[in-house]
Amino acid sequence: MALRARILGAAAGGGLPQWNCGCPNCDAARAGRIPSQTQSSLAVTGNGRDWAVLNASPDIRQQLANCPDLHPTGLREMPLRSVLVTNGDIDHVAGLLTLREAQPFALMATAAIHEVLDANPIFGALNPGLVRRETVALDRPFPLAPGLTAELFPVPGKVPLYLEGDRVETDLVGEQTVGVRLEAGGTKAFYIPGCAAVPPDLAARLAGAALVFFDGTLWRDDEMIRAGLGEKTGRRMGHISMSGPEGSIRAFAGLDVGQKVFVHMNNTNPVLDPSSPERAEAEAAGWIVGQDGLEIVP
Ligand code: MLT
Ligand code: MN
Ligand code: ZN
């Protein structure tokens, strides 16, 4: 038994390149000067045979095709046992529609996220006789796949963009945005692709972990505004930034985490360019910038 994790998609919603974006990174990815990245998803196994997919991105069809461990093992036999979603965002749930071809698996989420899915009749395309919708309580370990235990815990975040009302709380702590603790054979890892801040209780939870995949959406809080691509800060989107006094690099500096891996990078994030000074700065601080297909064994 050994925990293994494979990044299926390292980018945030939109991917790299994003279809309608002409920013320097997207242009560079289109031209093949920097690697393209698909949208946010992680595959994990505790025994090398049975897999869970954390977040179902709109790119899941290609992501599964690119991952031999997740190919069919028989006519309609798959190593995929469960799909767990950490929030209701489009980049994390739209891929469920691709998984509709009469294949059994467990669809796991908190009650609040299941409510969002249940309220969208299109997800009825997942045959309820085959896809079991399992509600997961916070802070209680549960079997995610054979040989793999998980536990969900709340992290600061917000409701999905398409459910935002006039007033938006960007640091809600509850069932809308969760992190995942993974354990197999005594090895522990964390997956937190969306997170607005690292308060002391989260820092304490992560301290000493062998491996943490963490929200790497933006390098700077006002990155999208500076790029001329929108009015929102990272904070407004419910995402902590990497740099700065309140950023994730600073927040993790004293936490003694074995391997720190950024995931869910927005296409404007300069770290997506392997030759950028920001990439060098993140790596110098001990971070791995995730990329599609990267496999990590804690
Ligand atoms: C996010 O991570 O903030 C969301 O995926 C944004 C979106 O839904 O486009
Ligand atoms: Mn997202
Ligand atoms: Zn772009």
Image (tube, helix red, strand yellow):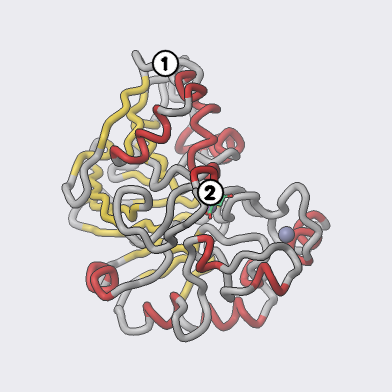
The C terminus sits in image quarter? bottom left
The reply to whether residue 296 is in sight is no
Above or below, 48 relative to 251: above
Q: Is mark 1 within 8 Å of ligand 1?
A: no
Query: Residue lying furthest front in this view?
Result: 166
The reply to whether residue 3 is in sight is yes
**Which residue is depicted at the point 51% across and 23% down?**
122
Amino acid under disc 2 = Leu
How crowded is the residue under tag 2: few (<14 C-alpha within 10 Å), some, or many (20+)?
A: few
How crowded is the residue under tag 1: few (<14 C-alpha within 10 Å), some, or many (20+)?
A: some
Q: Quadrant of residue 173?
A: bottom left
Task: Give the image location of residue 275, x and y in percent.
Answer: 69, 76
Residue annotated with mark 2: 161
Mark number displayed over residue 127: 1
* Closest to the observer, 225 or 51: 225
Amino acid under disc 1 = Asn
